[in-house]
Image: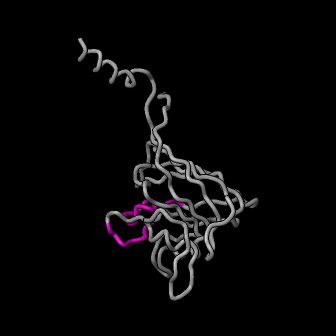
């Protein structure tokens, strides 16, 4: 009898019309060579059918498309390069667990941390969600998300890593939380 009750209790969520979906809210801040600065808003990341869905709620960014990537380390601090502090360099390189060493964008077979461009409107706000097909919320644990000053061409030519330029915003990813959602 107790086995039946245990199995019934474990199966209840399957029949209740609810499921658990991973979700994480990443606070984003401006960064420069001296460290982190003003809060810019958040990114809400959840698992979707086609990959991770990233919904920005950001303001205070430059207008236009921005390179947007998951980086290897959970840090947004500056780090020295050639004797000078560089904004967000402590975040490390693009998240590349398969060691491809290729920058092919979110739909290629390169870095897993390559995300679609972040679109910023004329008011400096970004609110349009993007889907990252090669990524899940669980992949973000122990990482950071970086926004670059310019657009990303999803190639290593003519400039390495898409040519997005300086790192202008960053957020350290907190622990993902399970969130009950209704199935339709």
Q: In this view, does 59 lie to the left or right of 162?
A: right
Q: Residue furthest top?
A: 1
Q: Can residue 114 be seen in this snapshot?
A: no
Q: Does the magenta stretch include residue 109?
A: yes
Q: Where 112 sits versus 81, above or below?
A: above
Q: Give the residue at x 44% y 62%.
A: 113
> Which one is in front, 99 or 152?
99
Q: Give the residue at x 44% y 71%.
A: 93
Q: Is residue 113 magenta?
A: yes
Quarter containing the N terminus: top left
Residue 165 point in image, percent of width and height: 57, 76
> Which one is in front, 103 or 144?
144
Residue 51 point in image, percent of width and height: 44, 48
Residue 47 point in image, percent of width and height: 46, 44
Q: Where 45 sits versus 61, above or below?
A: above
User: Which quadrant of the view contains residue 111?
Assistant: bottom left
Q: Residue furthest right?
A: 123
Q: Give the residue at x 65% y 54%.
A: 41
Q: Is the magenta stretch mostly helix, strand or loop?
A: loop
Residue range highlighted in magenta: 99-116
Q: Can residue 34 be seen in this snapshot?
A: yes
């Amino acid at each position: 009898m107790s086995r039946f009750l245990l199995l019934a209790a474990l199966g209840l969520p399957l029949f209740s019309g609810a499921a658990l979906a991973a979700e994480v809210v990443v606070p984003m801040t401006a960064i420069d060579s001296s460290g982190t600065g003003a809060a810019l808003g958040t990114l809400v990341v959840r698992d979707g059918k086609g990959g991770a869905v990233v919904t920005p709620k950001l303001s205070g960014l430059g207008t236009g498309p921005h390179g947007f990537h998951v980086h290897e380390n959970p840090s947004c601090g500056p780090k020295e390069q050639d004797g000078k502090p560089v904004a967000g360099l402590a975040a490390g390189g693009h998240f590349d667990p398969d060691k491809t060493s290729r920058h092919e964008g979110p739909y290629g077979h390169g870095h897993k941390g390559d995300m679609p461009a972040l679109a910023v409107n004329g008011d400096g706000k970004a609110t349009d969600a993007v889907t990252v097909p090669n990524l899940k919320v669980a992949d973000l644990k122990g990482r950071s998300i970086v926004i670059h000053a310019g657009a990303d061409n999803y190639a290593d030519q003519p400039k390495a890593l898409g040519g997005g330029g300086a790192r202008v915003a960053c957020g350290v990813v907190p622990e993902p939380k399970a969130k009950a959602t209704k199935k339709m």
